[in-house]
Image: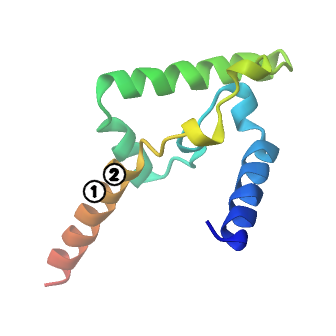
Amino acid sequence: MLAGGRLLLGFRKWYYNACGFNKLGLMRDDTIYEDHDVKEAIHRLPERVYNDRMFRIKRALDLSMKQQILPKNQWTKFEEDVHYLDPYLKEVIRERKEREEWQKK
């Protein structure tokens, strides 16, 4: 990996930790603003993935209300944060754009 690539990766890891959501056990996709497309994508998640998401969000809300964070060994790590919502969101957006194109005709 080039030095610039390592530097960029280092910055991305630093920024990820600086955001703080990982200290509550959340993943990046747990924090996305829920517009209509995102809500539809969440609705399409497999049950296990949806339940895991809800568990993380409820635990984070509980910790936040108590003004606490998880022990460091339970923080979501940058390398383990999967973009689980991306494929569903891309599909929803593609379908919406397709519908909009059909409605123009």
- Residue at image location 20% in from the left, 68% down from the top: 99
Q: Quadrant of residue 58?
A: top right
User: From what the image shows, is residue 57 above or below residue 93?
Assistant: above
User: From what the image shows, is residue 67 above or below residue 37?
Assistant: above
Colouring scheme applied when the structure was drawn = rainbow
Query: Mark 1 belongs to which amino acid?
Result: Glu
Q: Please name the residue that numbered disc 1 is placed on.
A: 91
- Residue at image location 80% in from the left, 21% down from the top: 69
User: From what the image shows, is residue 33 above or below residue 57?
Assistant: below
Name the element at disc 2: helix
Image quarter in which the C terminus is found? bottom left
Name the element at disc 1: helix
Q: Quadrant of residue 9?
A: bottom right
CB-based contact (under 8 Å), mark 1 and mark 2: yes
Task: Name the spot of residue 85 as percent of width and height, x first.
Answer: 41, 45
Near-viewer residue (80 or 5): 5
- In the shown orientation, is residue 34 left or right of residue 86? right
Query: Mark 2 belongs to which amino acid?
Result: Pro
At label 2, counting other C-alpha atoms closer than 10 Å, the crowd grade (few under 14, some 14-19, many 20 or more) is few
- Residue at image location 72% in from the left, 48% down from the top: 16
- In the shown orientation, is residue 54 left or right of residue 105? right
At label 1, counting other C-alpha atoms closer than 10 Å, the crowd grade (few under 14, some 14-19, many 20 or more) is some
